[in-house]
Amino acid sequence: MTAVIDVGNVHKRYGGTVAVDDVSFTVDEAEIFGILGPNGAGKTTTVECIEGLRTPDRGRIRVLGLDPRTDAAELHQQLGVQLQESELPERIEVGEALELYSSFYRTPADWVELMRTLGLDSKRHTQYRKLSGGQKQRLSVALALVGRPRIAVLDELTTGLDPQARREVWALIEGIRDRGVTIVLVTHLMEEAERLCDRVAVLDLGRVVAIDSPSALAAGAGVEQRIRFRPSIPLDDRLLTSLPEVTGVTHRGGVVLVTGTGDVVNAVTSVLARNGIVAGQLRVEQASLEDAFVALTGHGAASGEIRGEL
Amino acid sequence: MSAIAETLSAAAPRSALRRLTITEAKLFVRERYGIIWGVGFPLVLLIIFGNIPAFQQPSKDLGGLTYLDAYVPILIAFVVAILAVNAMPAILAGYRERGVLRRMATTPVGPSRVLAAQLIVNLVLAVGTVILILGVAWLAFGVGLPRQAAGFAVAAIFTLAALLALGLLVAAVAPSGRGANAIGALLFFPMMFFAGLWLPRAAMPAVLRHVSDFTPLGAAVQALQDSAGGGWPHPLHLAVMAGYALVFGVAAARLFRWE
């Protein structure tokens, strides 16, 4: 894997506020890389430095081997951007916007084809102000892709979308990655990061607190997993408590609740199988990225905003 | 580098600028404001004035000019003021407010091209409307075409330069599209007063006319009037307009922000 984005020890402050504090990470070709964190964590500032919209106070940034400040025009040929809270002129039509933006690039995509792919065909002559939130977002994604970029940076892609529209956009992003485009996805939605990202950088108060795959983050956070089942025959607790992965066993009516860490699910189910016990109504609650986030930052969910979005 | 310097220096992908200018022109027409108040309204005023018989009689108050003669340059000032100081800044400040310019900053073309496209659209529309007004006044109402055509062109160019610079300054300082509208309106009425919209300069008391000489549109109207009558614009009036173009232009270049 070759790194297409290389961010090293980047600092950025606005007046007295430190927005980005010694952030480093690399993004590999054709992966979906998530930048996750609550509002104010420094996510947007970080990607704006990558996009060349802001200059870091210190640190090194290379995108496709280019310096975003000095090689901005060349970088922007190869980097597609979807900005948070950026709109188009109210009265521009969908087709006009795509045609206009495609004229900016050396080797643009076929914008009619792109419009069709994104399901905006029937909106070709609709003005921007008359589009729904989901349609605006899809147009914004289309404009980020119309230059046939090697990297797409998408900031708060699905904010303000209903669950149905959100899932449509997610499917779309996966399709784009399958075409070999590297994607940097800025989000504060755990579900989005879990569903889409190959790797995630968790940012908190301007610092990177962890970088890993969503499942590894969840597993590595040492968060307990819960297994709930109704055993077919009465169960001797010692069968389970003797397992190193198990941290607790409790009974509630006929239901057994086992808590544990690591690969506790496998350990428990194989013990049950060896003893001929059928686990009825089996339910496993595994640690999610959200649990990992709380464990890593010590506040995540308490900020309310993250839970509110889930 | 300042925003406006970039506009002038960056190497333009020509097809992008052409497509951008076409798009901005379409949006300008759809927006309607500039077309109604910058083109339609001055033409309607011309037609109304042209149909008042008294406006066709030479007037002693105006030193032998007819009121219609006096109003043609005033209406030209009206056109330029609406397009340059009201319509254009409202669009540009609105673009900044809504992140349109910021989005452009992430493309190879950059936001300066939007500024260039807006200047081209307003310039072309202003020149076209001025020609239309001169043509209608001449063909329909017998107002003679400017007798010193070169002088008239020079006066018109200085007028456009001063007012477009002022418009860019308004776009630079206005926080929003609405804010730019408010500032534009606030500037429009005093400027048009000194241009003579309510009382032509020739009929103004001497003190008022002296003040008017040093306002952008007072100088503009007199320079246009002088060359329409066959003379060259007075250097004072050209200097006043050049001064405003320079001061407003430099201030706009320093203050303009893309976001």
Image (cartoon, coloured by chain):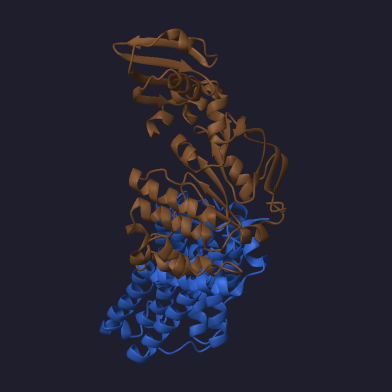
Chain colours: A brown, B blue
Viewed as shown, does residue B36 lie left or right of A202? left
Residue at image location 37% in from the left, 83% down from the top? B66
Q: Nearer the viewer, residue A65 or B182?
A: A65
Residue at image location 41% in from the left, 25% down from the top? A285
Q: Is residue A216 above or below residue B138?
A: above
Where residue B144 appears, x then y in whole percent? 42, 90
Name the image quarter holding the N terminus of chain B. Answer: bottom right
Residue B172 can be seen, yes or no = no
Q: Nearer the viewer, residue B84 or A200?
A: A200
Viewed as shown, does residue B17 lie left or right of B46? right
Where residue A196 appears, x then y in whole percent? 49, 43
Residue at image location 58% in from the left, 76% down from the top? B234
Q: Is residue A257 above or below residue B34?
A: above
Which of the 4 image quarters holds residue A203?
top right
Where residue A280 appears, x then y in whole percent? 33, 23
Q: Nearer the viewer, residue A229 or B240?
A: A229
Which of the 4 image quarters holds residue B5?
bottom right
| Count of picture labels | 0
Residue B50 can be seen, yes or no = yes
Q: Is residue A235 above or below residue A161?
A: above
Where residue A7 appears, x then y in whole percent? 69, 42
Residue at image location 34% in from the left, 17% down from the top? A231
